[in-house]
């Protein structure tokens, strides 16, 4: 069996605890009881809250709020947990640190330190930071998930919820609540079977289908059958195409053999090739056309380029003389156009003048003379470099054509010899072509036989090309079909594996379903057995503590955790019908916790607030002796009214107490100067 201990608790600026306070909860000389005293409002409940939050973490806030329901004055409000004095001084962080140790006969002892730092902000929720340190591993752990797993290894949340409690509030807990039932199952180890069922259910519904039928599509067997059909179809098509390729290969071989025979006949018989005849004719037409162009160009050279080139240096003089004559003709033309119009111009200027603008005859004669002289001076004297007369060309257009000839490029003279050689070569080739054409056209039989053979040859070549083209198409299709068939076979192989996996998965799912049913049956039977053991323990403790042996044999819980009292005559009555007192209900709940502690696989410490409220004097002694101080560690938070420091009950339990503390509040509870002082005694009594 493994036992969990809370070695110490350190809290800083939490609730009424200003600054840092550390409580040592370790055992001393075999004594495991810790007694913390304080009057109402001294901070005992805050101490319980601090211990729970230090162990559980941020998720413990919801647990405390569900348990501590009631008025606004008693309801837990974590947002207001920062100490008022620290807040007034500008501090914004509280710290909670718990050191827990696990003692196991099989694996030995180990410790863990859990530190929670909570920073409060004015306009948002508090920010948590979690740290942990293990005794068997160096270094500080800051990963929240790792810290949560580490906490669960020492003191799981469901254990802390049951064994860190307010005795007065816990009597109102309904044992039939789902979270209570799950907590009981976890404490007694029955949750293992529930988790096994859930794991098997996940295995059946998700993991097995995902592992053995990852596609999540249609039935693997149906898909495999479809692939088999596609493979057979592809193999049949491929076989037909290969057979067709063999037939085409034979046909191609026959066509090539026949074509070879035709080629031999053409060479042996000397048949005229119509294509060759046509090519020769086309060649003759082409050479004739080229020769005509060369002759035309050569004629132009003889008639124009050669005479112009023979002028030599006189060529430019002739060009200049022609240009000068053209200017002479233009001048004479302008002069002959303007001079006859001089009298008309004189009349336009001086004739029909209004009377007020008329000139004196001598003045008018003067200006008429000046106008006439001015118009004559337009052409007298003639421009410089103008010849006295025209004798080379009679018109300007002819003169321009002559000048154009004079300015023509004479490069063609350099190619004169080459053109003559080319014409001679063309004449030779034309004579040969004429002779060849004459021979071909005179041999009528050879021409006819050639036409027949060449037509046959053309048909064979066309057939050969068609067969070759079809063979290439079939080869490409065969290659495609081979690739497609290989891919289909690969898919078929993979799908066969998927189908086999699916079949194995179905078998595994069926096996897992049988295991799940077996786990459920085991859990059900174990739950009945554990409920019977809890009933025996609770009934025995409740009867002894409340001293009602004469009336009742014990207590039984049904499958819904409804409580029944078993009378001495073996008849059962419901708990509600007996009209039990609040103290007896509290004893029943405490006995239930003690039964869980005795049967638990991992035994936690007992931390209880208001332990003896509503209990009479005799029952208090029994509760302390048989419940609170019967385990390996008990941390009891009590008032002096519950456990009087001067009373005999305190003297009876001192030999089982390792340490005692007292919480002393001072200041007004609603003011910033309200805080708690801690002393190592119990209301003045020391151990």
Image (spheres, grey):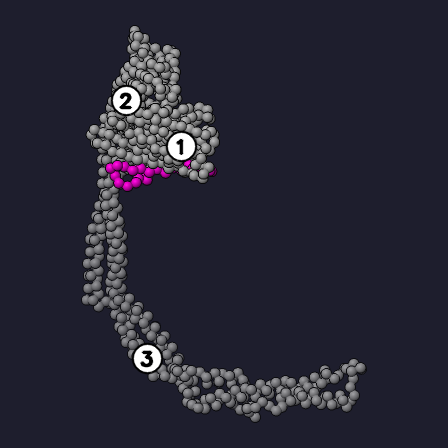
Residue at x 33% of width, y 80% of height: 423
| Quadrant placement of the N terminus | top left
Res. 566 image quadrant: top left
**Is 370 above or below relative to 275?**
below
Task: Say which element carries label 1.
Answer: strand
Prevailing secondary structure class for the magenta stretch in the rendered image:
strand
| Quadrant placement of the C terminus | top left
Percent x, y of residue 387? 55, 91
Percent x, y of residue 560? 34, 18
Residue at x 28% of width, y 66% of height: 274
Spatial distance from mark 3 to mark 1, Cα to Cα? 125 Å
| Sooner in the amino-acid sequence: mark 3 or mark 1 | 1
Callout 3 crowding tier (Cα within 10 Å): few <14, some 14–19, many ≥20: some
Give the residues in magenta: 120-143
Q: Is residue 267 visible?
A: yes
Residue farthest toward the right in the current orientation of the protein:
355
The residue beneath circle 1 is 17
Residue at x 69% of width, y 88% of height: 372
The residue beneath circle 2 is 655
The residue beneath circle 3 is 422
| Sooner in the amino-acid sequence: mark 2 or mark 3 | 3
Callout 2 crowding tier (Cα within 10 Å): few <14, some 14–19, many ≥20: few
Most foreground residue, 530 or 292: 530
Q: In the rendered structure, does residue 448 fall within the stretch colored magenta?
A: no
């Amino acid at each position: 069996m493994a036992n969990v201990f809370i070695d110490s608790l350190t809290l800083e600026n939490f609730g009424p605890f200003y600054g840092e306070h550390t409580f040592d909860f370790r055992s001393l000389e075999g004594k495991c009881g810790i007694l913390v005293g304080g009057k109402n409002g001294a901070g005992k409940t805050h101490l319980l809250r601090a211990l729970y939050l230090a162990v559980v973490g941020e998720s413990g806030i919801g647990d405390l709020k569900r348990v501590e329901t009631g008025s606004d004055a008693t309801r837990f409000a974590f947002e207001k947990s920062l100490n008022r004095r620290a807040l007034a001084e500008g501090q914004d962080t509280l710290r909670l640190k718990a050191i827990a140790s696990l003692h196991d006969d099989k694996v030995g002892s180990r410790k863990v330190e859990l530190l929670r730092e909570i920073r409060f902000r004015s306009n948002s929720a508090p920010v948590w930071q979690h740290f942990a340190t293990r005794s068997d591993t160096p270094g500080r752990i800051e990963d929240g998930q790792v810290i949560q797993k580490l906490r669960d290894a020492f003191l799981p949340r469901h254990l802390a919820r049951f064994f860190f409690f307010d005795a007065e509030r816990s009597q109102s807990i309904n044992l039939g609540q789902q979270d209570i039932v799950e907590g009981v199952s976890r404490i007694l180890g029955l949750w293992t079977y529930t988790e096994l069922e859930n794991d098997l259910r996940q295995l059946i519904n998700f993991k097995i289908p995902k592992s053995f039928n990852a596609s999540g599509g249609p039935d693997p067997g149906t898909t495999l059958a479809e692939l088999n059909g596609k493979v057979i179809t592809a193999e049949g098509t491929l076989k037909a195409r290969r057979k067709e390729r063999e037939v085409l290969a034979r046909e191609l071989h026959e066509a090539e053999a026949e074509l070879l025979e035709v080629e031999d006949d053409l060479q042996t018989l000397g048949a005229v090739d119509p294509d060759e005849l046509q090519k020769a004719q086309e060649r003759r037409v082409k050479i004739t056309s080229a020769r005509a162009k060369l002759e035309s160009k050569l004629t132009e050279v003889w008639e124009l380029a050669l005479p112009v080139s023979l002028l030599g240096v006189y060529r430019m003089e002739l060009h200049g003389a022609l240009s000068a004559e053209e200017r002479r003709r233009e001048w004479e033309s302008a002069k002959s156009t303007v001079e006859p119009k001089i009298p008309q111009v004189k009349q336009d200027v001086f004739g029909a003048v209004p009377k007020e603008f008329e000139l004196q005859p001598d003045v008018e004669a003067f200006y008429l003379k000046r106008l006439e002289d001015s118009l004559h001076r337009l052409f007298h004297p003639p421009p410089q470099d103008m010849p006295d007369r025209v004798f080379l060309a009679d018109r300007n257009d002819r003169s321009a054509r002559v000048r154009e000839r004079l300015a023509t490029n004479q490069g063609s003279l350099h190619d004169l010899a080459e053109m003559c050689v080319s014409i001679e070569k063309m004449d030779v080739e034309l004579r040969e072509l004429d002779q060849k054409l004459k021979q071909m056209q005179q041999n009528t039989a050879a021409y006819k036989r050639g036409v027949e053979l060449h037509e046959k040859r053309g048909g064979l070549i066309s057939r050969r090309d068609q067969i070759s083209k079809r063979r290439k198409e079939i080869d490409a299709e065969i290659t495609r079909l081979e690739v497609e068939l290989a891919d289909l076979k690969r898919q078929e192989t993979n799908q066969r594996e998927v189908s086999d996996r699916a079949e194995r998965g179905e078998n595994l799912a069926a096996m897992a379903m049988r295991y799940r049913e077996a786990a459920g049956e085991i859990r059900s039977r174990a739950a009945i057995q554990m409920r019977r053991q809890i009933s025996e323990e609770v009934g025995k403790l409740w009867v002894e503590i409340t001293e009602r042996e004469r009336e009742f044999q014990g207590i039984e819980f049904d499958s819904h955790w409804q409580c029944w009292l078993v009378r001495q005559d073996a008849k059962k009555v419901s708990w509600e019908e007996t009209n039990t007192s609040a103290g007896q209900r509290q004893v029943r709940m405490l006995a239930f916790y003690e039964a869980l502690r005795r049967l638990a696989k991992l035994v936690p410490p007992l931390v209880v607030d208001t332990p003896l409220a509503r209990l009479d004097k005799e029952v208090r002694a029994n509760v302390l002796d048989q419940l609170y101080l019967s385990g390996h560690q008990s941390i009891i938070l009590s008032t002096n009214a519950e456990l009087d420091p001067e009373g005999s009950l305190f003297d009876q339990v001192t030999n089982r107490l390792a340490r005692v503390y007292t919480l002393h509040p001072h200041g007004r509870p609603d003011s910033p100067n309200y805080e708690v002082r801690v002393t190592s005694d119990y209301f003045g009594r020391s151990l």
